[in-house]
Image (cartoon, rainbow, N blue to C red):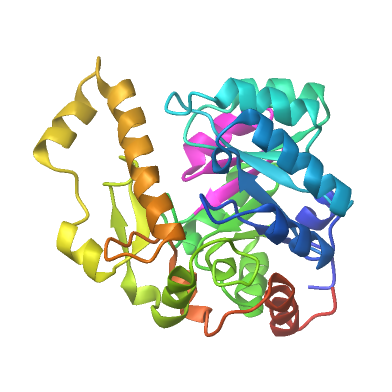
Protein backbone atom coordinates (compact mmCIF):
# COMPACT_ATOMS: atom_id res chain seq x y z
CA UNK A 1 0.00 0.00 0.00
CA UNK A 2 2.96 2.30 -0.48
CA UNK A 3 1.67 3.65 -3.80
CA UNK A 4 -1.11 6.18 -4.13
CA UNK A 5 -4.42 4.84 -5.39
CA UNK A 6 -5.33 5.87 -8.93
CA UNK A 7 -8.18 8.08 -7.70
CA UNK A 8 -5.65 10.30 -5.94
CA UNK A 9 -3.77 11.06 -9.15
CA UNK A 10 -6.95 11.20 -11.22
CA UNK A 11 -8.34 14.08 -9.13
CA UNK A 12 -5.21 15.27 -7.32
CA UNK A 13 -6.49 14.45 -3.83
CA UNK A 14 -4.71 13.19 -0.74
CA UNK A 15 -6.88 10.22 0.30
CA UNK A 16 -8.73 8.00 -2.24
CA UNK A 17 -12.28 8.69 -1.08
CA UNK A 18 -15.31 10.22 -2.80
CA UNK A 19 -17.98 11.38 -0.37
CA UNK A 20 -20.82 9.79 -2.30
CA UNK A 21 -23.72 11.92 -3.56
CA UNK A 22 -26.77 11.38 -1.35
CA UNK A 23 -30.20 12.71 -2.23
CA UNK A 24 -31.31 15.38 0.26
CA UNK A 25 -28.23 14.78 2.41
CA UNK A 26 -25.17 16.03 0.50
CA UNK A 27 -24.64 19.79 0.65
CA UNK A 28 -21.99 22.42 0.12
CA UNK A 29 -20.79 22.40 3.74
CA UNK A 30 -20.09 18.67 3.62
CA UNK A 31 -18.22 18.93 0.34
CA UNK A 32 -16.18 21.91 1.50
CA UNK A 33 -15.11 20.16 4.71
CA UNK A 34 -14.36 16.98 2.80
CA UNK A 35 -12.10 18.80 0.37
CA UNK A 36 -10.32 20.54 3.25
CA UNK A 37 -9.71 17.10 4.77
CA UNK A 38 -8.08 15.70 1.63
CA UNK A 39 -10.91 13.81 -0.04
CA UNK A 40 -13.45 14.78 -2.69
CA UNK A 41 -17.21 14.58 -2.92
CA UNK A 42 -20.24 14.99 -5.14
CA UNK A 43 -23.75 16.38 -4.74
CA UNK A 44 -26.85 15.16 -6.61
CA UNK A 45 -28.02 17.84 -9.02
CA UNK A 46 -31.57 17.03 -7.89
CA UNK A 47 -30.77 18.36 -4.42
CA UNK A 48 -31.49 21.75 -5.98
CA UNK A 49 -34.96 22.67 -7.15
CA UNK A 50 -33.73 24.88 -9.98
CA UNK A 51 -30.65 24.97 -12.16
CA UNK A 52 -29.87 28.46 -10.90
CA UNK A 53 -29.72 27.14 -7.34
CA UNK A 54 -27.35 24.47 -8.64
CA UNK A 55 -25.17 27.11 -10.30
CA UNK A 56 -25.10 29.16 -7.10
CA UNK A 57 -24.04 26.13 -5.06
CA UNK A 58 -21.18 25.30 -7.44
CA UNK A 59 -19.92 28.87 -7.28
CA UNK A 60 -20.19 28.88 -3.49
CA UNK A 61 -18.00 25.79 -3.16
CA UNK A 62 -15.42 27.28 -5.52
CA UNK A 63 -15.18 30.44 -3.44
CA UNK A 64 -14.50 28.41 -0.28
CA UNK A 65 -12.03 25.75 -1.47
CA UNK A 66 -9.79 25.00 -4.44
CA UNK A 67 -10.04 21.20 -4.47
CA UNK A 68 -12.04 19.05 -6.89
CA UNK A 69 -15.71 18.16 -6.52
CA UNK A 70 -18.43 16.65 -8.68
CA UNK A 71 -22.12 16.61 -9.46
CA UNK A 72 -24.25 13.47 -9.71
CA UNK A 73 -26.64 13.41 -12.67
CA UNK A 74 -29.63 11.12 -13.10
CA UNK A 75 -29.41 10.64 -16.86
CA UNK A 76 -32.65 8.81 -17.59
CA UNK A 77 -36.02 10.24 -18.66
CA UNK A 78 -37.34 10.62 -15.11
CA UNK A 79 -35.05 13.63 -14.65
CA UNK A 80 -36.78 16.41 -16.58
CA UNK A 81 -34.00 18.89 -15.69
CA UNK A 82 -31.16 16.70 -16.95
CA UNK A 83 -30.12 18.72 -20.02
CA UNK A 84 -30.22 22.03 -18.15
CA UNK A 85 -28.25 20.58 -15.24
CA UNK A 86 -25.65 19.21 -17.62
CA UNK A 87 -25.28 22.58 -19.34
CA UNK A 88 -24.90 24.54 -16.09
CA UNK A 89 -22.31 22.12 -14.70
CA UNK A 90 -20.29 22.35 -17.90
CA UNK A 91 -20.49 26.15 -17.94
CA UNK A 92 -19.31 26.28 -14.32
CA UNK A 93 -16.55 23.73 -15.08
CA UNK A 94 -16.98 21.28 -12.24
CA UNK A 95 -14.26 18.64 -11.95
CA UNK A 96 -16.27 15.48 -12.57
CA UNK A 97 -19.72 14.02 -13.10
CA UNK A 98 -21.10 10.84 -11.60
CA UNK A 99 -23.81 9.45 -13.87
CA UNK A 100 -26.59 7.19 -12.60
CA UNK A 101 -29.66 5.32 -13.87
CA UNK A 102 -29.30 5.76 -17.62
CA UNK A 103 -26.99 6.10 -20.62
CA UNK A 104 -24.06 8.48 -20.00
CA UNK A 105 -23.26 8.96 -23.69
CA UNK A 106 -24.45 12.55 -24.02
CA UNK A 107 -22.89 13.53 -20.69
CA UNK A 108 -19.52 12.07 -21.64
CA UNK A 109 -19.43 13.79 -25.03
CA UNK A 110 -20.36 17.20 -23.66
CA UNK A 111 -18.29 17.00 -20.47
CA UNK A 112 -15.12 16.08 -22.33
CA UNK A 113 -15.47 19.19 -24.48
CA UNK A 114 -15.12 21.18 -21.25
CA UNK A 115 -12.32 19.04 -19.83
CA UNK A 116 -14.62 17.49 -17.23
CA UNK A 117 -14.20 13.84 -16.20
CA UNK A 118 -17.12 11.42 -16.09
CA UNK A 119 -17.43 8.53 -13.63
CA UNK A 120 -20.27 6.10 -14.33
CA UNK A 121 -22.19 3.98 -11.87
CA UNK A 122 -22.22 0.34 -12.99
CA UNK A 123 -23.54 -2.86 -11.46
CA UNK A 124 -22.05 -5.47 -13.82
CA UNK A 125 -19.29 -6.05 -16.33
CA UNK A 126 -21.48 -5.75 -19.44
CA UNK A 127 -22.58 -2.23 -18.62
CA UNK A 128 -19.08 -1.29 -17.51
CA UNK A 129 -17.70 -2.26 -20.90
CA UNK A 130 -20.39 -0.18 -22.61
CA UNK A 131 -19.58 3.00 -20.70
CA UNK A 132 -15.86 2.41 -21.10
CA UNK A 133 -16.41 2.23 -24.87
CA UNK A 134 -18.33 5.51 -24.66
CA UNK A 135 -15.28 7.19 -23.10
CA UNK A 136 -15.95 7.10 -19.36
CA UNK A 137 -12.94 8.15 -17.27
CA UNK A 138 -13.70 5.72 -14.44
CA UNK A 139 -16.42 3.36 -13.31
CA UNK A 140 -18.02 3.19 -9.89
CA UNK A 141 -18.83 -0.38 -8.95
CA UNK A 142 -22.16 -0.16 -7.16
CA UNK A 143 -22.03 -3.36 -5.15
CA UNK A 144 -24.72 -5.35 -3.37
CA UNK A 145 -23.54 -3.78 -0.12
CA UNK A 146 -24.14 -0.22 -1.33
CA UNK A 147 -26.67 2.23 0.07
CA UNK A 148 -29.34 3.85 -2.09
CA UNK A 149 -29.83 2.11 -5.43
CA UNK A 150 -27.60 -0.88 -4.72
CA UNK A 151 -26.39 -3.50 -7.15
CA UNK A 152 -26.84 -7.28 -7.04
CA UNK A 153 -23.22 -8.47 -6.95
CA UNK A 154 -20.98 -8.43 -3.89
CA UNK A 155 -17.80 -6.36 -4.00
CA UNK A 156 -15.84 -9.60 -3.48
CA UNK A 157 -16.83 -10.69 -6.98
CA UNK A 158 -17.62 -7.43 -8.78
CA UNK A 159 -14.33 -5.59 -8.18
CA UNK A 160 -12.07 -8.40 -9.49
CA UNK A 161 -14.38 -8.96 -12.46
CA UNK A 162 -14.33 -5.28 -13.41
CA UNK A 163 -10.56 -4.97 -12.95
CA UNK A 164 -10.04 -7.94 -15.24
CA UNK A 165 -12.43 -6.70 -17.94
CA UNK A 166 -11.84 -2.93 -17.95
CA UNK A 167 -8.82 -0.71 -18.54
CA UNK A 168 -10.10 2.42 -16.79
CA UNK A 169 -10.02 2.94 -13.00
CA UNK A 170 -12.55 1.03 -10.91
CA UNK A 171 -13.92 2.66 -7.76
CA UNK A 172 -15.76 0.59 -5.18
CA UNK A 173 -19.08 1.69 -3.65
CA UNK A 174 -20.82 -0.30 -0.99
CA UNK A 175 -20.52 -1.29 2.65
CA UNK A 176 -17.34 0.65 3.39
CA UNK A 177 -17.36 2.34 6.78
CA UNK A 178 -13.80 2.14 8.10
CA UNK A 179 -10.22 2.78 7.08
CA UNK A 180 -9.57 -0.94 7.11
CA UNK A 181 -12.54 -1.32 4.76
CA UNK A 182 -10.90 1.14 2.36
CA UNK A 183 -7.65 -0.80 2.55
CA UNK A 184 -9.50 -4.05 1.86
CA UNK A 185 -11.04 -2.58 -1.29
CA UNK A 186 -7.70 -1.29 -2.55
CA UNK A 187 -6.06 -4.66 -1.88
CA UNK A 188 -8.90 -6.28 -3.83
CA UNK A 189 -7.93 -4.10 -6.79
CA UNK A 190 -10.11 -1.02 -6.46
CA UNK A 191 -8.54 2.31 -7.46
CA UNK A 192 -10.48 4.27 -4.85
CA UNK A 193 -13.76 4.17 -2.98
CA UNK A 194 -17.08 5.98 -2.77
CA UNK A 195 -18.56 6.26 0.74
CA UNK A 196 -21.87 7.82 1.68
CA UNK A 197 -23.81 6.52 4.66
CA UNK A 198 -21.13 7.19 7.28
CA UNK A 199 -21.36 10.90 6.42
CA UNK A 200 -25.10 11.19 7.15
CA UNK A 201 -24.58 11.45 10.91
CA UNK A 202 -22.27 14.46 10.65
CA UNK A 203 -22.59 17.95 12.04
CA UNK A 204 -22.60 19.45 8.56
CA UNK A 205 -25.35 17.22 7.15
CA UNK A 206 -28.61 19.19 6.75
CA UNK A 207 -30.92 16.36 7.84
CA UNK A 208 -32.90 16.06 11.06
CA UNK A 209 -31.40 15.04 14.37
CA UNK A 210 -33.68 12.00 14.32
CA UNK A 211 -32.25 10.84 10.99
CA UNK A 212 -28.72 11.20 12.34
CA UNK A 213 -29.64 9.40 15.56
CA UNK A 214 -31.11 6.54 13.52
CA UNK A 215 -27.80 6.09 11.71
CA UNK A 216 -26.13 5.76 15.11
CA UNK A 217 -28.74 3.47 16.65
CA UNK A 218 -29.46 1.11 13.74
CA UNK A 219 -27.00 -1.26 12.05
CA UNK A 220 -26.36 -3.30 8.94
CA UNK A 221 -29.06 -5.82 9.78
CA UNK A 222 -31.65 -3.04 9.83
CA UNK A 223 -31.20 -2.11 6.16
CA UNK A 224 -33.90 -3.26 3.71
CA UNK A 225 -34.73 -2.53 0.08
CA UNK A 226 -37.91 -0.78 -1.00
CA UNK A 227 -39.35 -0.05 -4.45
CA UNK A 228 -41.91 2.42 -3.12
CA UNK A 229 -39.65 5.48 -3.25
CA UNK A 230 -38.45 5.61 -6.84
CA UNK A 231 -39.67 2.44 -8.54
CA UNK A 232 -36.09 1.14 -8.41
CA UNK A 233 -34.97 -0.86 -5.35
CA UNK A 234 -33.51 1.53 -2.79
CA UNK A 235 -32.03 0.75 0.63
CA UNK A 236 -33.64 2.31 3.70
CA UNK A 237 -33.55 1.89 7.47
CA UNK A 238 -36.23 -0.58 8.53
CA UNK A 239 -38.10 1.75 10.87
CA UNK A 240 -41.55 0.94 12.34
CA UNK A 241 -43.15 2.98 9.54
CA UNK A 242 -41.32 1.02 6.83
CA UNK A 243 -42.35 -2.23 8.49
CA UNK A 244 -45.96 -1.06 8.53
CA UNK A 245 -46.17 0.11 4.91
CA UNK A 246 -44.07 -2.67 3.41
CA UNK A 247 -41.33 -2.43 0.83
CA UNK A 248 -43.01 -3.56 -2.42
CA UNK A 249 -45.14 -1.65 -4.91
CA UNK A 250 -48.82 -2.62 -4.98
CA UNK A 251 -50.47 -4.40 -7.93
CA UNK A 252 -51.49 -1.16 -9.68
CA UNK A 253 -48.04 0.33 -9.36
CA UNK A 254 -46.46 -2.84 -10.74
CA UNK A 255 -48.93 -2.96 -13.64
CA UNK A 256 -48.34 0.66 -14.66
CA UNK A 257 -44.59 0.31 -14.29
CA UNK A 258 -44.59 -2.52 -16.87
CA UNK A 259 -46.77 -0.72 -19.44
CA UNK A 260 -44.57 0.41 -22.33
CA UNK A 261 -46.63 3.52 -23.09
CA UNK A 262 -47.06 4.63 -19.48
CA UNK A 263 -43.77 3.42 -18.01
CA UNK A 264 -41.79 6.61 -18.62
CA UNK A 265 -44.39 8.88 -17.05
CA UNK A 266 -45.25 6.52 -14.24
CA UNK A 267 -41.61 6.08 -13.23
CA UNK A 268 -41.20 9.85 -13.24
CA UNK A 269 -44.28 10.34 -11.08
CA UNK A 270 -43.24 7.53 -8.74
CA UNK A 271 -39.79 9.04 -8.49
CA UNK A 272 -41.12 12.49 -7.64
CA UNK A 273 -43.64 11.13 -5.16
CA UNK A 274 -41.01 8.98 -3.48
CA UNK A 275 -38.49 11.78 -3.31
CA UNK A 276 -41.08 13.98 -1.60
CA UNK A 277 -41.52 11.24 0.99
CA UNK A 278 -37.77 11.15 1.55
CA UNK A 279 -37.66 14.93 1.79
CA UNK A 280 -40.29 14.98 4.50
CA UNK A 281 -38.47 12.29 6.44
CA UNK A 282 -35.10 13.97 6.07
CA UNK A 283 -36.15 17.34 7.41
CA UNK A 284 -38.88 16.64 9.95
CA UNK A 285 -39.45 14.15 12.75
CA UNK A 286 -42.69 12.28 12.05
CA UNK A 287 -43.98 8.77 12.43
CA UNK A 288 -43.72 8.34 8.67
CA UNK A 289 -39.95 8.06 8.52
CA UNK A 290 -38.29 6.82 5.34
CA UNK A 291 -34.56 7.23 5.86
CA UNK A 292 -32.19 6.13 3.13
CA UNK A 293 -28.93 4.54 4.28
CA UNK A 294 -26.61 1.62 3.59
CA UNK A 295 -25.13 -1.20 5.70
CA UNK A 296 -22.06 0.88 6.56
CA UNK A 297 -24.08 2.66 9.27
CA UNK A 298 -22.95 -0.36 11.28
CA UNK A 299 -19.74 1.62 11.84
CA UNK A 300 -21.45 4.86 12.90
CA UNK A 301 -21.34 5.09 16.70
CA UNK A 302 -21.66 8.82 17.24
CA UNK A 303 -22.29 12.09 15.45
CA UNK A 304 -19.04 13.67 14.24
CA UNK A 305 -17.88 16.42 11.96
CA UNK A 306 -16.89 15.54 8.40
CA UNK A 307 -13.30 16.34 9.36
CA UNK A 308 -13.45 13.87 12.26
CA UNK A 309 -14.90 11.15 10.04
CA UNK A 310 -12.07 11.54 7.53
CA UNK A 311 -9.41 11.71 10.24
CA UNK A 312 -10.79 8.50 11.77
CA UNK A 313 -10.72 6.82 8.36
CA UNK A 314 -7.10 7.81 7.79
CA UNK A 315 -6.08 6.69 11.27
CA UNK A 316 -7.81 3.34 10.89
CA UNK A 317 -6.30 2.89 7.45
CA UNK A 318 -2.96 2.78 9.18
CA UNK A 319 -0.77 4.15 6.43
CA UNK A 320 0.40 7.73 6.13
CA UNK A 321 -1.19 8.94 2.91
Q: Is residue 152 visible?
A: no
Name the residue: 18% across, 57% down: 246
When the figure is inspected, residue 210 is found, relative to residue 105, above or below; the finding is: below
Indicate left or right for 290 with 107 as reference: left
When the figure is inspected, residue 144 is found, relative to residue 230, above or below; the finding is: below
- Residue 127 magenta-highlighted: yes
Q: Is residue 308 visible?
A: yes
Name the residue: 44% across, 54% down: 148
Farthest residue in the left direction?
251
Residue 314 image offset from top left, x and y in percent: 75, 77
Indicate left or right for 146 with 52 as reference: left
Q: How many marks?
A: 0
Residue 32 image offset from top left, x and y in percent: 77, 58
- The quadrant holding residue 242 is bottom left
Residue 97 image offset from top left, x and y in percent: 68, 38
Q: What span is colored magenta in the figure?
A: 119-142
- Residue 320 magenta-highlighted: no
When the figure is inspected, residue 297 is found, relative to residue 98, above or below; the finding is: below
- The quadrant holding residue 117 is top right
Residue 6 image offset from top left, x and y in percent: 78, 55
When the figure is inspected, residue 100 is found, relative to residue 289, above or below; the finding is: above
Name the residue: 59% across, 48% down: 140
Is the C terminus in the top left, top right, bottom left or bottom right quadrant?
bottom right
In front of the other: 265 or 40: 265
In front of the other: 136 or 111: 111
Farthest residue in the top direction?
261
In front of the other: 182 or 91: 91
Name the residue: 34% across, 44% down: 274
Is the N terminus in the top left, top right, bottom left or bottom right quadrant?
bottom right
Amino acid sequence: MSEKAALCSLLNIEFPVIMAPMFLVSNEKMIIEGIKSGITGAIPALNYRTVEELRKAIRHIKTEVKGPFGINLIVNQSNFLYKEQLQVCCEEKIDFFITSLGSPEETIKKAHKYGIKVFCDVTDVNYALKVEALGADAIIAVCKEAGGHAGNISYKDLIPELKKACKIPVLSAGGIGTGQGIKQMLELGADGVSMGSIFIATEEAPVSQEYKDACVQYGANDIVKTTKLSGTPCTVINTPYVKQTGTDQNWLERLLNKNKRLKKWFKALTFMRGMKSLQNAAFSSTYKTVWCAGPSIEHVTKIRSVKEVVEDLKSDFGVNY
